[in-house]
Image (cartoon, helix red, strand yellow):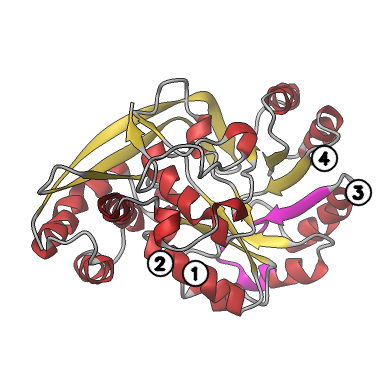
Amino acid sequence: MGSLATSFERVSLPLEHEFTISRGSTAAAENVIVRVEDEGGMVGVGAAAPSSHYGETAGTVEAVLPDLLAEVEAVGDPHALAEIEARMERVVADNPAARCAVSVALHDLAAERLGVPLYRLWGLDPGDAPASSFTIGIDDTEVMREKTAAAVEAGYSTLKLKLGTDRDREVVEAVRDEAPDATLRVDANEAWTPRETARKSAWLAELGVEFIEQPLPADDPAGLKDAHERSVLPIAADESCVTLADVPRIADRCDIASLKLMKCGGLLEAKRMVHAARAHGLEVMLGCMVESNAAIAGGCQLAPLVDYTDLDGSLLLADDADPFEGVPMPEGRIDLRATDRNGTGAVER
């Protein structure tokens, strides 16, 4: 079985631009990097990108990681993923981002030891990975137009717009004018009402928007169902879809389940959620927080299982801010074949 050595460190990753959604703004992402090393010197890496919206901070991640990593060392086998996951949940029931960092690091090491990329270990077709959207955060309308122009110039063909202000229509019209051929998605981050969602969905459809993400607060499931029934456009549930148990709850009030590794606690749980969503007739989107490639790379390996991806978290960071390189994503395409790296594909710069 061997033995495993573990460590973690906190890093502050500055963003290229301050990033704003309907709930607030951030200029830097606090991540916690986890490393798991086997007796032969192979190292698996993962990262936690905690969100205070879900009750986590970098400080809480640092507080619980010693207990989580003690379970990893007690088992001593990176391939015993289910056993380690179960033990971690018994020790720390919440703190999904912290558990996710460990999950990604273990998957990275397990696949590395077998000499294969993680997607291959799972038997997935890398060609099935859908291209990622690129997110334009809330800003002055002209600034959002300029960011759109830069994204289009960089080759991104799918854009996700953060909405939730009294300028929503003005913003979408400006972006559509700047990017007439782009696929547009919008995310209100719980800022709208059912009536507002229905009304806005009509003109959003006219502007060629593909779907609306989380228009209603997560604590208003009846409102989300109402919005879903009245909306012209498909609805994706993000804040309403956190763990596996949420999938059946949202099945009759949305069209798309939006998963994040940092919400659900790791790669095994995310796979379960994908299959549960399929069983309930939902499409699936895989999203992210603002994350290091040490975490994003794990999501990229899972991408062939889903319909949509929003895995641009590392792309929003300032140049050279991320200590890791990940899966290449030229123009948003998740190119799992681009390198000969095993594991998740994350490597230190």
Nearest the eye: 189 or 246: 246
Q: Which residue is mark 3?
A: 206
Q: Residue at x 54, y 54 (%)?
A: 303
Decide which of 142, 245 is in the foreground and name it. 245
Vertically, is 185 above or below 72?
Answer: above
Give the residue drawn at x 46%, y 75%. 245
Report crowding for label 4: few under 14, some 14 to 19, many 20 or more residues within 10 A (C-alpha): some
**What element does badge 2 sit on?**
helix
The tag earlier along the polypeptide, 1 or 4, is 4
Please tell me how crowded label 2 is: few (under 14), some (14-19), or many (20+) other residues with Cα within 10 Å: some
Q: Quadrant of residue 150?
A: top right
Q: Earlier in the sequence, mark 3 or mark 1?
A: 3
> In the displayed structure, does residue 289 sit left or right of residue 33?
right
Tell me the magenta residue range: 209-224
User: From the viewer's perspective, is the residue at label 1 or at label 4 nearer?
Assistant: 1
Q: Is residue 174 above or below residue 68?
A: above
- Look at label 4 and name its amino acid: Arg
Q: Amino acid at mark 1?
A: Met
Which residue is nearer to you in this view: 205 or 226?
205
- Would residue 92 be visible to someone looking at this image? yes
Q: CA distance from mark 2 to mark 1?
A: 6 Å
Q: Nearer the observer, disc 2 or disc 4? A: 2
Residue underneath mark 1: 273
